[in-house]
Amino acid sequence: MTKILIIGGGGMIGQKLARQLAADGWQGQVAEVTLYDVGFPSNCAEAHRRIVGNLTGNGAATGLAATRPDIVFHLAAIVSGEAEQDFDKGWQVNMFAGWSLLEALRGEHEASGGSYQPRVVFSSSIAVFGAPFPDQISDDFLSSPLTSYGAQKAIFELMLSDFSRKGYVDGVSIRLPTICVRPGKANKAASSFFSSIIREPLNGRKVILPVSDSLRHYHASPRSAVGFLSHAASLDTGLLEGRLSLNMPGLSCTVAEQIEALSDIAGAGTVALISSVEDPEIARIVGGWPQDFDSARATALGFRSETSFCDIIQTYIDEDLGHS
Amino acid sequence: MTKILIIGGGGMIGQKLARQLAADGWQGQVAEVTLYDVGFPSNCAEAHRRIVGNLTGNGAATGLAATRPDIVFHLAAIVSGEAEQDFDKGWQVNMFAGWSLLEALRGEHEASGGSYQPRVVFSSSIAVFGAPFPDQISDDFLSSPLTSYGAQKAIFELMLSDFSRKGYVDGVSIRLPTICVRPGKANKAASSFFSSIIREPLNGRKVILPVSDSLRHYHASPRSAVGFLSHAASLDTGLLEGRLSLNMPGLSCTVAEQIEALSDIAGAGTVALISSVEDPEIARIVGGWPQDFDSARATALGFRSETSFCDIIQTYIDEDLGHS
C-alpha cells in the first residue's frame, strides 16, 4: 500500500488533496495517508493518521522520515504576507525546516542502503519571480524574488534539486499560480484578496478591493492545484532532464475580468458588494508579481488548468460554497 | 578609515585583493584590512590583522560582525570538486556559514539602530547555471545548477538579496567566470585544469588535459577578478534595481584556443608538455558548465575583463610566474 505523507495536511490544499485520496485512492488502490500540520480544521478530511506537530521542532523531521513514506507532499509554509512581517519565522519554517526534512529523508535513504528514495512534491510558487518581467514569462526566465517568501521558495527548490541529483530523494517542484477561489477566511498572504473579492460577495458579504482593477495576475483553482500535485507525484522525473522546477499552467486575467466573470455568474447586485480602498503595502508586493506565463514545459508534461475565470468561480461554487 | 574584511583572505583571490589594497588603499586612502581564513600562505599579503578561524565555528560570524567592517568581501568557499565529494562539508561552509554571516551582520545592523549597513560583496560563480544553454547566456537566464557548489552559490545569492532588500546589508553578488591562470598548485575545483594546462608548461612541467580540446569555456584573469571585486565594492547598488546578482564579463574560448595562445607566447616546445587523458568525472561536471555570456548589465555598469587569451596568459607571466 502506497504510503503518502502530506506535510501541511491541515491547510486548504492539503485537505482537498486528502479528500481526493480518500475518495479515489492512489492510482486506483487504497493509500495510507498521513497528515502532518500544526493544527487541523474541525471538519478534517479522513486519513489513516493525523499528527499535530511543527516541522521546525527538534526531531520532527526525522520522526516523519522514519515512517518511510513513498510520497511526501511538502505543502507547509509561512505565507507571503506573514514571512514579510516576521523575517525570522519565515526563514525558520520555509527554509530551515525544509532542509531538516531533506536531511532526514537522506538519512533514511542511506540507512536503507540506497533503496529508499521517496518522491518529494514541493508546492513552490510564482513568487520566485520578481519584476521587471516580459509579457509572458518563459520556462528559462530567471528567479529574482522580491519577497522573503519568494526567496525561501526558490532556495528550497535548489536544495530539492541537489538532493534529487544526488539520488537521495526523487523531487519535483511545482510553481503554483495564485490559488483562487480560496474557501474559508482570508489569510495573511498578500494574494488573499484575489479570492476574497469573489468569495465574500458570493456569500452575501461586503469586501474591499485593495488594488487597482487593471492589475493582471495568474490564477488556478484549488481543484487544479490538487491535480498538479497528483500529476507531479506520478510523473516520470527522468523527463525533467535535471530541471525539477516547473511553472504550472494557469489563467492570466485582470481584476476587472475577475469581477466581470462574477457579474456573469452572480449578477450586478453581488458585484456591488465590492468597494475599492487601495492598500499601498499589498499593491507594492503584488505589483512585483508575475502576470502571465508561457508554461510550455508543464503543458507538454500533461499539467492542466482552467481556461476561463468563470470556470474558476464555478469550481468554488461546486466544491465550497455553503460547505464551511 | 574604511574597514575592510576579506573572508577567505588566505585564498588566491583574497591575497591578490589584499596586495592591491596594501599598495593602492581604498579610494585613495589607507584602508584597515582584516584577512580571515582557515590558513594563510607563508608569503602572506600585508594586512592590519590576520585571523585564523573557520566561519562555521561557534560565534565566528558574530565575532567578525562585531568589528563592524564597512566592506565585507565574502570569498570563502569549498570549491566545486570538493563540494561534490563531501556533500555535508559543502553545504555547511557554502550555505550555513554564509547564513551565519548574514545573521551576524543583521544583528549589528539592528544593534546600531539601523545605521550600520555594510557593503557585502559575494564571489558567486557561473556554476549557478546548468546545461542546456543558449549559445550566449543572457542576464535573465535561469539558474539551474548541476553541482552542489552551484546550488550553494545560487542559494547564498538569494539570501544576500533578501537581506539587502530588507536593508540589513547592502549586497552585490558577482558571478565570476573561471579564473585563469591560477598560480600555485592545482586545487580540488573541477575547473582547475583550465589553469594547469597553461601554468605547468610555462614552468617547464608536464600536464594532463582531462577533457576534449573542443570544449569551450568562459575565463577571466585573477587581475580581472580583483578588479570586479573592487568595482562591486564601490558600485551604486541602487543601479541594480533589486537584481543583485551580476554575470561578470569574460573571454569565451575553446581549450584549443587556449593552447594556441600558449604556443604564440611560449612556443611549440612548451605546448608539447601537454598530453590528453580524458577524466570522465571532470568532463561530466565541466560539460554542464556555461560556454559564453552576453554580460550586458555588468558591462554597462563598468565591469571590464580581458579580450584575448594571450592577455590572460601575459597577466600570469607578469604577476605570478617565478614568484612562488
Image (cartoon, coloured by chain):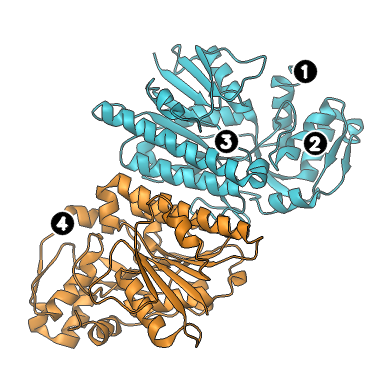
Chain colours: A cyan, B orange
Q: Nearer the viewer, mark 4 or mark 3?
A: 3
Query: What residue is pinned by disc 4?
Result: B279
**Which amino acid does the dot numbered 4 rest on?**
Asp
**Which amino acid does the dot numbered 1 rest on?**
Gly
Q: With respect to residue B169, does A165 lie above or below?
A: above
Horizontal placement of B281 versus B108: left or right? left
The one nearer the camera, A237 or B63, is: B63
What label does residue A197 carry, if any? 2
Q: Distance between the residues labelled 1 and 2?
A: 17 Å
Query: What residue is pinned by disc 1?
Result: A322
Query: What residue is pinned by disc 3?
Result: A77
Residue visible at 42% across and 79% down in the picture: B227
Residues at badges 4 and 3 in contact (C-beta under 8 Å)? no
Q: Indicate the secondary structure of the residue bearing disc 2.
A: helix
**Which amino acid does the dot numbered 2 rest on?**
Ile
| N-term mark: 2 or 3 | 3
Callouts 2 and 3 on one subunit: yes
